[in-house]
Amino acid sequence: MKTPADIITRLQLMSQDGTKSDRRLASLVLSDLDFASKAAISEIAARVGVSEPTVTRFCRNLGCEGLRDFKFYLAQAIAIGGQYLSPEPLSRDAREQRIASAITEAAVTAIQRASENLDMTTLVDVAARLAASGNVLCIGSGGISSMMATEMQNRLFRLGLPVLAQIDGQLQRMYAAVATPDTTVVAFSVSGYARSVIEAVQVAQQYGAATVAVTAPDSALAKVADTVIHLQPFEDGNIYKPTSSRYALLAIVDMIVTSVAETRGPKVLENLRRIKQSVNTLKVDDPRLPLGD
């Protein structure tokens, strides 16, 4: 029998399209997850007004072997995504007046915590390695880490470094396979368990590349990289807004790039001047605009 991939989704579908008894049972479970995960089969049957064999058939229709198996997958789903199933209602004030402060305060807190836990000696050493690299490969998977790999490329190319970002898992391994001792791989992973990123780091190491991970301490990625810049994700429990960890990660990227620029010194200025000249003449001649758009 197939293992239920997402028991909550199956319950939601059954509450709409199942038999009459299955719809009633599914609705009960979804409305009272705590009861359903702990109650005996007799209690569930009595509450819905069905027989115990009907409860067993319901579990099997969901792809489970029986009630015990069903409870296992339900408990797993509650542990992983329970906060999204029965969130506290938002007050009108939170919706209309406090969004700006919620975002900015969480971003500031995330950046401050990341800064407090940074080993700046390690960060400066990484910047020195990047400044002297023959080429740089930035890799990351998922929403935040892939964005940071691309941002690192965006920041380093203007300093005159040959840099490439790869967010596709297969291409990460392919580019890692053509690394050399002059290559520095910068790997981003908030969790530290993105498989393609870990494998790409290991492949690049076979060919002598230096590897740097910006990731969670003691994670799988942290254990394989040559150098680790620790990032401890900060979550504030607000499930309605995007994670604030990406502000912390962006701050770390900016610190690395600033150190790289200072290490390379005045020779980065001509590239910056050319970019400024090119972009501003195509748009509007305003030197106060940022370097780019």
Image (cartoon, rainbow, N blue to C red):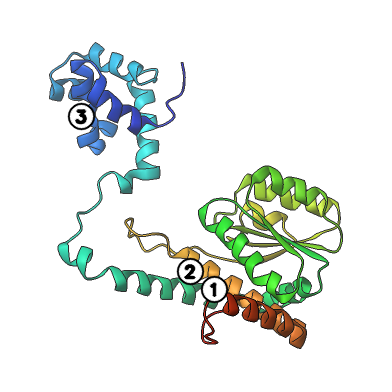
Q: CA distance from mark 3 to mark 2?
A: 40 Å
Q: Position of residue 26 (x, y in %)?
A: 24, 26
* Residue under numbered circle 3: 27
Foreground: disc 3 or disc 1: 1
Write the residue at 19% across / 17% down: 21
- Mark yes or no: residue 73 visible: yes
Q: Position of residue 20 (x, y in %)?
A: 18, 16
* Residue under numbered circle 1: 251
Side (left or right) of 64 relative to 221:
left
Side (left or right) of 142 relative to 272:
left
Q: CA distance from mark 3 to mark 1?
A: 45 Å
Depicted 18 relative to depicted 181: above or below: above
Label 1 neighbour load within 10 Å: few <14, some 14-19, many 20+: some
Q: Which mark is residue 208?
A: none
Residue type pointed to by label 3: Ser
Depicted 157 relative to depicted 65: above or below: below
Q: Secondary structure at mark 2?
A: helix
* Residue under numbered circle 2: 247
Residue type pointed to by label 2: Tyr
Q: Secondary structure at mark 3?
A: helix
Write the residue at 70% across / 49% down: 172
> Looking at the image, which is closer to me, 221 or 10?
10
Label 3 neighbour load within 10 Å: few <14, some 14-19, many 20+: some
Write the residue at 48% across / 69% down: 247
Q: Position of residue 96 (x, y in %)?
A: 20, 66
**Of the image marks 3 and 1, the number of the one nearer the N terminus:** 3
Write the residue at 46% across / 23% down: 3
